[in-house]
Amino acid sequence: MRIKYVTIPSGNTAEEEIFFVKFLGFKHNGDLELWPNVCCKLLSNNDSDIHIAIIPNTYILNQKAVIIFNTENCLKQYHEITKNGIVFNHKPYYVSAGMIAEFKDKEGNQFILLEERSYIED
Amino acid sequence: MENVLKLSNENLICSSKLTYKNLTEVNNNFSLHVNFNGNEKFVLNKKKLRLCPHTFLAINPGTLYSDIIDSDSPVQKISISFGKGFIDDFKTSFLKNDNYFPDNHGNHLPQQNLTFNETIFPLLGDLKYNIEHLKVLIRSNCQDELLLNEFLYHILLNYYTLSQKDIFFVEERLKDLQFVTRKEIYRRLSLAKEYLYSNFDQKINIYELSKYSCMSATHLIRSFRQAYHTTPHQFLISIRLKQAQFLLKNTSYPINEIVNIVGLDSPSTFIKLFKIRYKITPLKYRISHNAIN
């Protein structure tokens, strides 16, 4: 058993799809009926085989997603996404897991860039 | 090979891989010098220092210094010189946004007049990560000033955090002493540490060390233990083992040669100390690292 789809609830799935494609560099992989009468938009990028499934949030009332993207270089990724027009909640900062930067989409779903760092001296 | 990148705000990044260098100049701006392999000597005013792999040196503006490399194999390093305006902006933004100070250590407000400690530090934590990322960017010929300055801001922040933590750590342990005495002891202990970093491969005499750090031998050992929970000798052993670990990972030098390079007495002492510290023998450590690579 493995995780294959991560759902993003959205009131406007077309707009959410544009957000992922234009700002985050994802590719559209088609539409899929994941459960009866609910058509999801599937997206993916080259870095993972886990798909993003944008689902109409009329079915899941007021739920927000928190997605954590793992990155090798948080500052560089932050810089690239900022250049695409995304406004981050804060500048990148440090937590015990490493360096993170956060932003939200129009729906209020939260996205976190995480560069995991080991602070244990080997 | 030397790659110098001068940004429009006077920040300067110099990445080099040299076997020989002999430069003497007055440092115009605050600068950080990071060594990745090999040895590099610095003369700062009258202090003779040596940077070994994965340590760095901070030099304040106005300091006359010499940077000397004379090595059979290329020494890889990065020097960053921060423009005056950039430092001023850092101070302003830093002081205004203290609540957002990453890794804020216990609401210890920074002084209005930020000063930098001109000494050798180990390259650790976020500073190590950000310097490594910067090294990759420079190697890929990145010309994006916004991105490079973002990294330089974080590197300066990491350096400041590291040096403030060091001061804070020592001052907390010496809190029974008067403020001025604490500051002075911290300064002298920093001298002792930089002497150990610079001469770890030599036979170090406690009296030479205490003379360099302007303390009596007894006072030095007592204060060092109180401040860092270790003795100067144990600290020296840690530096030697760290350097030995680097050589095991990155070279094919035989164990006997590594023992000589890091200034330890005998292979048996080295193996014993290494095993106590890292819970693995040097040979197994080398094999496991080679297997990963």
Image (spheres, coloured by chain):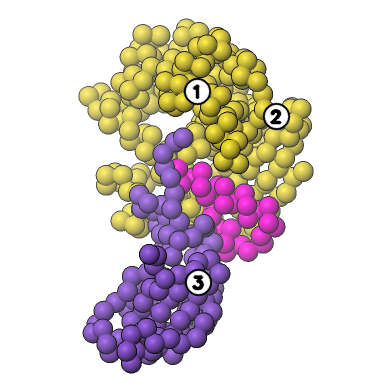
Chain colours: A purple, B yellow
Residue B56 magenta-highlighted: no
**Direction from residue B93 to residue B129 in the image, left or right:** right
Q: Is the C-beta separation of discs 2 and 3 under 8 Å?
A: no
Q: How many numbered discs?
A: 3
Front position among marks 1 and 3: 1
For the point 60% across and 46% down, the residue is: B80
Residue B129 magenta-highlighted: yes
Amino acid found under the numbered disc labelled 2: Ile
Q: Which residues are magenta?
A: B125-152
Q: Main secondary structure of the magenta part?
A: helix
Residue bearing mark 3: A82
Label 1 Cα crowd, 10 Å radius (few <14 / some 14-19 / many 20+): some
Cα distance, mark 2 to mark 3?
Answer: 41 Å
Which mark is on residue B281? 1
Residue bearing mark 2: B68
Where, by quadrant of the figure, is residue A50 drawn? bottom left
Tell me if I can see residue B88 in this picture. no
Provide the chain ID for the residue under circle 3. Answer: A
Cα distance, mark 1 to mark 3?
Answer: 47 Å
